[in-house]
Amino acid sequence: MRYLFDPTYFLIIIGMAFAGYAQWKVKSTFSKYSEWETSKGTTGRQVAQAILQQTLINNVQVEHVSGDLTDHYDSRHKVLRLSDATDMETSVAAVAVAAHECGHAVQDAENYFPLRLRNALVPVTQIGSAAAMPVIIAGFIFQMMGLVQFGIILFSLVLVFQVVTLPVEFDASARALKILEQNQLLAPEEMPAARKVLNAAALTYVAAASATALQLLRLIILSSRNND
């Protein structure tokens, strides 16, 4: 019962509120610009294929994946997957998201270091994410502060991964906007809307890292109290 009303819970609440706002922002922004049809009438898939061709990337396949906002680039299998709301849609939002995923494909083709680092961190991050909280809880239960500190180190791997992810996502969006503009895949008046969609998406990564940082701070505070 010691931590039932602990003030450090406010750190968790702040992180959850920021993450919730970011999710709302990206969904509302995507929904808004999903209703704005591009003047060229090209689908997300057509734009993705055009970008891959223009950037001389011939080893990446474009596939459909079910769901909304489930778009992603699989660097291991060289597959760019576009969701229901992106693949065959002709909206500004769909084109922006498709171009963003192509940005990751370009990063991969150029051996962009932050992307390589993020991919290398995936295995250890998965271990840290799965093991951190059980280890920390066990440490508090048995009053083994060394175990708690080890759990905190494991948890910090998640934050490291999320921080490394930020430049990867920002760079992919910057590449996407540049390609869309230079190759006139969107009209000039459509570019600000595409930028808003990608900025909203980027905010979710900032929010996730912030929430993890606040959780990590809380764990450090609780650990320090037990060491006193």
Image (cartoon, rainbow, N blue to C red):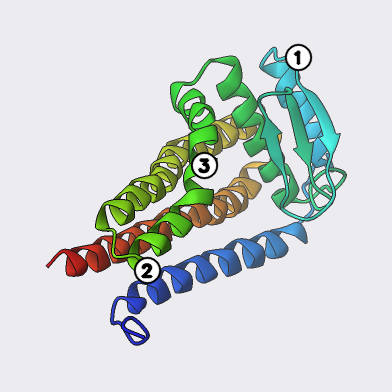
Q: Nearer the viewer, residue 197 or 143?
A: 143
SS of the residue at dot 1? loop
| Residue 144 place in picture, x, y as percent | 29, 59
Q: Which residue is mark 3?
A: 127
Q: Which residue is mark 1?
A: 59
Q: Hey, what amino acid is under mark 2?
A: Ile
Q: Hey, what amino acid is under mark 1?
A: Asn
Residue reaching furthest to the left: 228
How much space separates mark 1 and mark 3, taking CA atoms?
A: 31 Å
Looking at marks 1 and 3 on the same chain, the residue that comes earlier in the sequence is marked by: 1
How much space separates mark 3 and mark 2, taking CA atoms?
A: 21 Å
Left or right: where 137 falls relative to 218: right
SS of the residue at dot 2? helix
The quadrant of the picture occupied by the C terminus is bottom left
Left or right: where 28 falls relative to 65: left
The vertical placement of 24 against 48, above or below, is below
SS of the residue at dot 3? helix
Looking at marks 3 and 2 on the same chain, the residue that comes earlier in the sequence is marked by: 3
Query: Mark 3 against mark 2, which lies toward the viewer?
Result: 2
The vertical placement of 51 against 157, above or below, is above
Q: Hey, what amino acid is under mark 3?
A: Ile
* Dot 1 alpha-carbon crowd within 10 angstroms: few under 14, some 14 to 19, many 20 or more: few
Left or right: where 224 falls relative to 66: left
Tag on residue 141? 2
Residue sitting at 36 percent across and 47 percent down?
156
Instruction: Give the number of callouts.
Output: 3
